[in-house]
Amino acid sequence: MEATLPILILSIPLFMFLFLGLLGKYMAHKWAGILGTLGMGVTMILAYTVAFTYFFSGNPEFINGAGERLQSIVFNVDWLQFTDTLVIRLGFLLDPIAAMMLVVITTISFMVHLYSNGYMRDHHGVWETGFQRFYAFLSLFSFSMLGLVVATNIFQMYIFWELVGASSYLLIGFYYTKPSAVSASKKAFIVTRFADLGFLIGILILSYYTGTFNFTELTSVPVEGIADVYQVSAGTAEAVKSVFANSAAPMFMGASVMTWALVLIFMGGMGKSAMMPLHIWLPDAMEGPTPVSALIHAATMVVAGVYLVARLFPLYLMETAALDIIVVVGAFTALYAAMVACAQVDIKRVLAFSTISQIAFMMVSLGVARPEFHHGIGYMASMFHLFTHAMFKALLFLCAGAIIHAIGSNDYTEMHGLRKYMPVTHIAFLIGCLAIAGIIPFAGFFSKDEILTACFGHSMVWYIWMSLVAGLTAFYMFRLYYLIFWWKEHKVHEGHHAPHDQAWTMTLPLIILSVVSCVAGFVPFGNLVTWNGHPMFDHAGFLTNLEHLDWSVACISLAVAVIAILIATKMYMKENPLPDKMEQALPNLWKWCHHRFYWDELYMFITHRIIFGLICKPIAWFDRHIIDGTMDGLAFVTNKLSWSIRGLQSGNVQTYVWIYLIGVLLLGSITVLCLI
């Protein structure tokens, strides 16, 4: 493939960021929105062209005679060369997951750009202050995420990884005059920096022992004795020298150094994807404008951790202890977030915890993926769920934005009965809920079922665990749906307009994403995105996913979802005392869930009481009184001593003669005494 289109995919968002950032304040708000949206629209068309060319052109550059999809480095230029072997390059890597992510990122970003033209204005048509800056930041974020997913080496990924963090900081803190937004942006930035430190250390360890940063070389290293099971697809690069093939690989605390490297790299993914215990930043990040929530925290930024593990998946297969850690972290995060979502009153926070839970679903799927079971179906299922979740979670967030724009509040107690006032938003939100709940034939049903199938093949414990999480997902999403659109009649406050569906710029993305959420599950993902590029199905058609379902797993998961929806319907469709009775029956559980199991309070206790109070204060006292006191004492003594002997430098010649004479006499006397 020629490099022109890939270069434009990266260049257009970067140009729009610089153009709107530098010149946006000199143009009308309307034109900033139009130019930003057009720029992202062109980028989306180019990304679709590249992705469709990769998947469907049959080009030998992308697919070999065995039908396996290959990695293709479109371009790769030297950026920093420290030594002959230590070279950092910037390039464009095209393979199944990169092509899929190009579609996801540009689609969601374009929808958010279009949607923001309506959202960032009030009911009187007055534009938000800093509207041009907002579009500049959206373009910067899109550029950062696109650069991350097409990186040819792990150091390039880290560069764009950090740029994504900076972009999210700017977008979360867009309302910089609002203290809570400033606090949320700092919280997101600081928490993810701790995780990224682990990521950087992992990169350094991995590159030190493998001798390369390049993904093509890192992920094509066969291991003697395992290569027969974990087959490397044909056409990959020549294997590099690696400690994976060395039986005397270094060990540390009972684990190989490569296990430590991969766990530390996963730590970076934990921060970006808000896995426990580094999840605390994501709910507070809802302080940014709702389109930001849809872009960053539903579809793109938070899946960067999942993408990172998927990118290095062949390495994780060789160190399965790291995969086991991923499964445990993901499973506990999924259950925790689902429980917390059941007790939130802020609709954006419900969706935020839902995102945490669904991202954890993807992590678990990667963790349980093994080639010996259904050709590594867990890998495909994780990427499939990443794709479908991006669509219906962006839909849900944009619906929430339309509701908040109409009501002026995030609290569901201010809503109720909105189905009569906002019919388009109502239908779109219902489709999103059905998709995330896993109801056939909506998109979430197919991807969730594949994840549960992978869990079933790996461990019955994790299958039951994740089925419970899936049931909770259906429950809390329909709890939210009924509390917003049903429960009781909506009361229009005096002096306020009745809520209504929004302008076409906000409604059109809802319609498009609704349609995608209905049909995306039928994409034959198993023939497009697999861990080794080998298609999973003999043929690919519209009904391929239905034909290859494990119906024993599908029927059980579908039954669990339907039961959870029926319970939510009974409790929340019409106003009744059941929710209060449930809260009174389990007061402690509800309280803990409502307060997010006090994770924020725990962090505040650790930072303020322990780190600041017990560690930092004594260190500060020692610094002020011992170190500063010692320096001040030395200065005081030096000053006093110099004052005392200042007469020695009086400038009086007679005094100098007497001192000289006395000195000579003393030296003479000492010499005589020594001779005697």
Image (cartoon, rainbow, N blue to C red):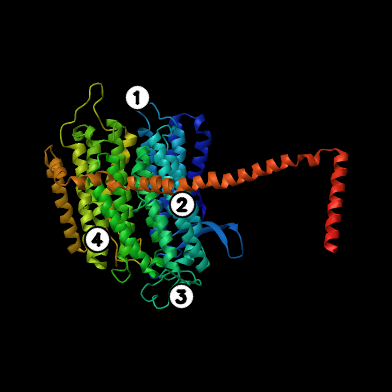
Q: Residues within 10 Å of mark 2 (few under 14, many from 20)?
A: many
Provide the residue designation for mark 3.
Answer: 245
Which amino acid type is marked by label 3? Answer: Ala
- Furthest-front residue in view? 676
Gap in angstroms between the C-alphas marked 4 and 1 = 48 Å
x then y, percent, for residue 641: 70, 43
Secondary element at image label 3: helix
Gap in angstroms between the C-alphas marked 3 and 1 = 67 Å
Q: Residues within 10 Å of mark 4 (few under 14, many from 20)?
A: many
Provide the residue designation for mark 4.
Answer: 452
x then y, percent, for residue 124: 34, 24
Gap in angstroms between the C-alphas marked 4 and 3 = 33 Å
Q: Is the C-beta separation of discs 3 and 2 under 8 Å? A: no
Provide the residue designation for mark 2.
Answer: 161
Q: Is the C-beta separation of discs 2 and 4 under 8 Å? A: no
Q: Earlier in the sequence, mark 3 or mark 2?
A: 2
Gap in angstroms between the C-alphas marked 1 and 2 = 39 Å
Residue in the image at 26% along x and 33% along y = 501
Residue 1 appearing in the image: no
Which amino acid type is marked by label 4? Answer: Leu
x then y, percent, for residue 524: 30, 59
- Single out the mark in the foreground, 4 or 3: 3
Provide the residue designation for mark 1.
Answer: 124
Residue in the foreground of this view, choosing between 435 and 256:
256
Residue in the image at 47% along x and 65% along y = 216
Which amino acid type is marked by label 1? Answer: His
Gap in angstroms between the C-alphas marked 3 and 2 = 30 Å
Secondary element at image label 4: helix
- Single out the mark in the foreground, 3 or 1: 3
Q: Is the C-beta separation of discs 4 and 1 under 8 Å? A: no
Q: Residues within 10 Å of mark 3 (few under 14, many from 20)?
A: some
